[in-house]
Image: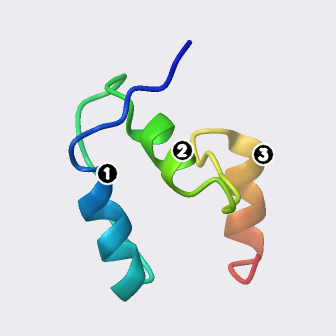
């Protein structure tokens, strides 16, 4: 499936230059994760809905 660039992409990238944390909210299944993975491919993705990944974070916040 081909990625569709969102209008907000440039604003998010600009904000990323100044802020270490950016919050993107919205309803389920609208493409928030896809947007982030495409804008910041060099970052690791951690899905906190997965119990195993969430448990690692809960045990060691420094991860």
Q: Residue furthest top?
A: 1
* Residue at horizontal 49 percent and vertical 35 percent from the top: 34
Residue 29 in the image: state x and y as whole percent: 37, 22
Q: Few, some or many C-alpha atoms within 10 Å of disc 2 (few <14, some 14-19, many ≥20)? A: few
Local secondary structure at mark 3: helix
Residue 4 in the image: state x and y as whole percent: 39, 26
Please report whichever mark, 3 or 2, sits nearer to the chain's N-terminal start. Answer: 2
Whether residue 19 appears in this view of the structure is no
- Mark 2 = which residue? 38
Find the distance from the CA under tag 3 to the CA under tag 1.
Answer: 31 Å
* Residue at horizontal 31 percent and vertical 26 percent from the top: 30
Q: Is residue 41 above or below residue 5?
A: below
- Mark 1 = which residue? 9
Whether residue 10 appears in this view of the structure is yes
- Mark 3 = which residue? 52
Q: Residue 37 carries which label?
A: none
Local secondary structure at mark 2: helix
Q: Few, some or many C-alpha atoms within 10 Å of disc 1 (few <14, some 14-19, many ≥20)? A: some
> In the image shown, does 50 or 14 lie closer to the viewer?
14
Q: Is residue 14 above or below residue 17?
A: above
Please report whichever mark, 3 or 1, sits nearer to the chain's N-terminal start. Answer: 1
């Amino acid at each position: 499936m081909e990625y569709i660039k969102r209008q907000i992409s440039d604003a998010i990238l600009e904000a990323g230059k100044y802020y270490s944390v950016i919050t993107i909210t919205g309803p389920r299944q609208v493409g928030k994760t896809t947007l982030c993975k495409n804008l910041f491919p060099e970052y690791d993705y951690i899905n906190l809905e997965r119990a195993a990944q969430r448990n690692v974070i809960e045990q060691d916040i420094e991860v």
